[in-house]
Amino acid sequence: MIRHSLWEEGRRKKEESSALERETDILIIGGGITGLTTAYFLKDCGKRVLLLDKGEVGGGVTAKTTAKITYLQKTIYQELKERFNKETAKQYYHSQKAAIKLLTNIVEKEKIACDLTETDSVIFCFEESNIEKIKKEEALLREWKEEIEPIMHEQIKYGIKGKNTYTFHPLKYLDSLTKIVKKKVNIAENVLVTQIKEEDGYLVKTSKGQVKSKTIVVACHYPFFLIPIMIPLKTYIKREYVNAARVKEPKNYMALNIDSSLHSLRYYKDYLIYVSLDHKLTSRINYQKNYEESKKQFKKFFHETPEYTWMNQDIMSHDGLPFIGKIKENLFLATAYNAWGMTNGTLAAKLISDEIRGHISFYHQLFDPKRNNLTLMINSFVGSFAYLKVYAQALWKKNLPVYITQTGVRYGLYQDQDGTVHKIKLVCPHMKCSLVFNKEEKTWDCPCHGSRFDLDGNIIEGPAKEDLSKTTYKKEEDDHNNSEEDQNE
């Protein structure tokens, strides 16, 4: 079984990235769909643009998406109507339609070969109690003149289908976008940004030196700073498990249920991609059990053994809307896409690039990252208790292969096949949560905010902005006879 996404299979190594410039007009942090699309929209703005990525562009969260380009997003419109008002729901609907048009226009204009396919979207329910929710969503969409068809099937209670939605290969899209952007924008890979300081514009500290910039766009999935926006309080992380395998009869639709237990699918050529077992990161930290359950579900429903298995993490805002826009003078943020990164990432790039050019978007207030409302405040308060709970749970030794305590500091140990022991300090640098071991992917994961590190403590995914304290040695060099050692089989 392959433990990376289907999109990463056979991906060619791109050209070497540019040397790190020390001064620029616009600095974009993050090389996923938001960062690269922002660079695309700014490439002809007449200013120096630099894009930095902590790894390889396109190698982060976008590489793990299911790549659905749709406005049918569970029952988001009625939820926004109840939480705010109908006008807010309608604005969000129009924003998603606009994003679909933006993305498909880029593909058409640039003649990008990314397997873009017009694909019907379906939302459905297994539980009778959810029929009314889908019908309310259907009524809203019909009111907004959307062509919606009811779906009747013996295996579901109720569903609706929408047209003019798409799927594609996300990395074929990003790799082509990178080639276009690199003609006019400098892209530096393997550069980790660790600090932003206001100093005659902005002074940015990175793993390869400092960069000075007049304007900054933070497009790195989860922002690495707390103040002024306090994203950890306004959001939570949702983790989901993805399996894929070849099937004999692929279909041309994507589907998503609205019940408490997630079932999401789409097809790519002769592959079926299925997502299940989504959960708040703080609620289920036995990751190995989650992977196994997701693979069993795939085999049960589709009678195939997964060929690919991977995991994705989404930032979810407590009020259901992304955070996109200016947070300080010439400092912009885009995050919390609520699992709809293809549309919202593209939209964020357009809104931010327009504002940098001096044009204020119609959606400026809708996505304002500085917004506060009752829903955000209540859920931020409740969410802090979830962090406290998981912090305590992460200390349980059953979540670690081996740990030792030395002079009051806890270390995690993992011995690989050649006998090398990897020893890391079990504290996430972001907000000091205790790490747990992800046996499936052999990583150290933060159950609070989603930072991930490899066996040697090197950062894979933020918001942490530094590696862990680590040591490696051969097992025979240390007999582990520490009086404080505790081992969990």
Image (cartoon, rainbow, N blue to C red):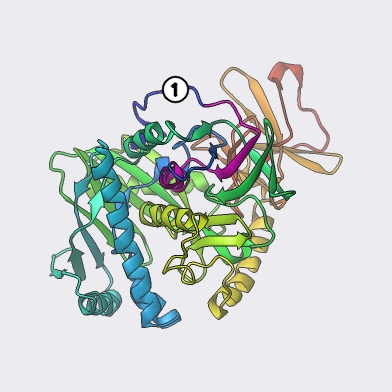
Point out the image quarter for the C terminus: top right
Q: Residue at x 16, y 49 (%)?
A: 252
Magenta includes 487? no
Q: Position of residue 356 (x, y in %)?
A: 52, 55
Q: Position of residue 339 (x, y in %)?
A: 41, 57
**Residue behind mark 1:** 15
- When asked about the image quadrant of residue 64, the answer is top left
Q: Position of residue 353 (x, y in %)?
A: 47, 53
Q: Residues within 10 Å of mark 1 (few under 14, many from 20)?
A: few
- Circle 1: element type: loop
Point out the residue furthest to the right here: 407
Count of numbered circles on the image: 1
Q: Residue at x 31, y 61 (%)?
A: 98
Q: Residue at x 16, y 69 (%)?
A: 147
Magenta includes 37? yes
Point out the image quarter for the N terminus: top left
**In the image: residue 182, left or right of residue 428:** left
Residue 71 vs residue 262, the one in the foreground = 71
Amino acid type, residue under disc 1 in the picture = Glu
Relative to 192, say whether 12 is above or below: above
- When asked about the image quadrant of residue 308, the answer is top left
**In the image: residue 328, left or right of residue 275:** right
Q: Residue at x 27, y 80 (%)?
A: 136
Query: Can residue 428 be seen from the camera position used here?
Result: no
Relative to 341, say whether 317 is above or below: below
Residue range in magenta is 18-43
Q: Position of residue 412 (x, y in %)?
A: 69, 37
